[in-house]
Amino acid sequence: MSESFIKAISASEIAPGGMKALELEGNEIVICNSGGKYYAIQRRCGHMNAPLEMGTLDGIYLTCPMHCAQFDVTNGEALSGPVPSAIGNEIPPPFLGKYLQNIGMIMKNVRTETIRTYTTKLEAGWIQIKVK
């Protein structure tokens, strides 16, 4: 049985460097426009399930909006895990310092998984995706 493509969205709806989230056959997908080449990835981050379309796309590198984990949209590979946010040069209050220590201990065991990618093709101005 051959897998078929589904017409997803008009290519004109996604500017270069842009992303668009949609749902196809129960799959949450983000379509990325990397310089006129289209890639489709799972919508949720492989680290903490954040919506990736709210992140940034720089070429083929997508940065998660929540913890700055990075992914290659061509193959879904997790390129880096989360980046801790800086709290500046100020010393946090003792309760916050303890909280951040606890979060750090928990988070060190949370992996960043590679995300799923979907095969795409551009036909007659439409981005089509193979979801199976």
Image (cartoon, rainbow, N blue to C red):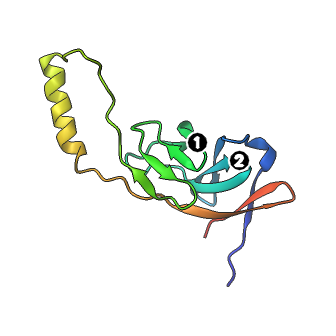
Q: Position of residue 4 (x, y in %)?
A: 72, 72
In the image, residue 127 sits, relative to residue 1, either above or below, namely above
Tag 2's secondary structure?
loop
Q: Position of residue 19 (x, y in %)?
A: 64, 43
Q: Residue at x 63, y 61 (%)?
A: 25
In the figure, residue 92 lies in which quadrant?
A: top left
Left or right: 98 as drawn, with respect to 81: left
Residue at numbered disc 2: 35
Q: Residue at x 58, y 42 (%)?
A: 58
Left or right: 14 as drawn, with respect to 107: right
- Between 109 and 70, the one nearer to me in the picture: 70
**Crowdedness of circle 2 by 10 Å Cα count: few (<14), some, many (20+)?**
few
Q: Position of residue 52 (x, y in %)?
A: 52, 44
| Residue type highlighted by circle 2 | Gly
Q: CA distance from mark 2 to mark 1?
A: 10 Å
> Disc 2 or 1, which lies upstream in sequence?
2
- Between 130 and 26, the one nearer to me in the picture: 130
| Residue type highlighted by circle 1 | Asp
In the image, residue 102 sits, relative to residue 42, either above or below, namely above
Circles 2, 1 touching at the beta carbon (< 8 Å): no
Q: Residue at x 60, y 63 (%)?
A: 118
Which quadrant holds the N terminus? Answer: bottom right
Q: Residue at x 71, y 42 (%)?
A: 16
In the displayed image of the protein, which residue is found farthest to the bottom? 1
Q: Position of residue 111 (x, y in %)?
A: 31, 53
Residue 58, labelled with which disc? 1
In the figure, residue 40 lies in which quadrant?
A: bottom right
Which quadrant holds the C terminus? Answer: bottom right
